[in-house]
Image: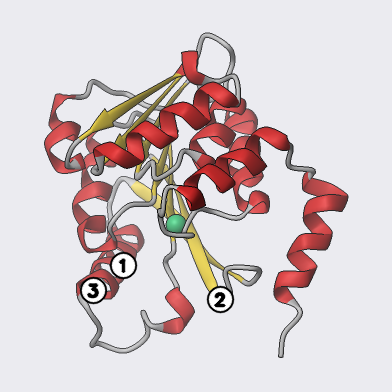
Amino acid sequence: MSNWAEMDRYLNRTVVQPDDALDAAVENTRNAGMPAIEVTAGQGKFLMLLARIHGARRVLEIGTLGGFSTIWLARGIPDDGTVESCEFEPAHAEVARRNLEGAGVGHKVTVHVGAALDTLPTLTGPYDLFFIDADKANNPEYLEWAVKLSGPGSVIVLDNVVRGGAVLGEGGDDDVRGIRRALEILGTHPRLEATALQTVGSKDWDGFAVAVVN
Ligand code: MG
């Protein structure tokens, strides 16, 4: 039995220090019957720090859910910066908008409702930072769109690239195949320099990939 979840709680209260707005966002998301698949607080703050370190002003997120990672991303950009976030489910987008308002970052965020693959062709780049965390089967397409909507130095983050090791081997469902294909693209794309890191914590064993656009 691992202590990963307990260690996450310790790190949250000692270092990350999430606040009431973030706790409320998670609670609202649960109360709306939405899945508990948002990033951890530590991962969310990593996204915020990445945005700040990079000096990001325009962020594109694919997969809003309840807006938990969206809040963190919005906190990592200046007040006149923007986060655009694509969400398939109208009900999820509604919860996210309330959570974003509750966290005081609603003015920085636009939630686009609909299939991301329909929304992405309507957007105008370049974005400084991308966070791809939606249905994994479409990860290869999302990644290609991110590259299209990027500029030199843009940063792309993909979540859930390990899935408890399910990505190993050659089988798996459409999601696992989508993750594997996206990792292959990250490793070979002429415009991308990428790495992937494994994580453990309250969401068990998973990982994320980070790429910079050349
Ligand atoms: Mg995720």
Q: Label 1: which residue?
A: 179
Report which quarter residue 123 is drawn in. top left
Mark 2 lies on a secondary structure that is loop
> In 3D space, how far apart are the residues under numbered discs 3 and 1 (Cα atoms)?
5 Å
Quarter for ligand 1?
Answer: bottom left
Q: Are marks 3 and 1 in contact (CB under 8 Å)?
A: yes
x, y (%) of residue 181?
A: 24, 68
Question: Marks 2 and 1: in contact by CB < 8 Å?
Answer: no
Which residue is at a point 52% across and 9% down the rendered structure image? 80
Image depth: mark 3 or mark 2 in front: 2
Looking at the image, which residue sits at the far right?
A: 14
Q: Is residue 55 visible?
A: no
Which of the marked residues, 1 or 2, is nearer the chain's N terminus? 1
Vertically, is 143 above or below 48? below
Q: Which mark is residue 177?
A: 3
Q: Amino acid at mark 3?
A: Arg
Q: To which residue does mark 2 refer?
A: 205
For label 3, being within 8 Å of ligand 1 is answered no
Q: Are marks 3 and 2 in contact (CB under 8 Å)?
A: no
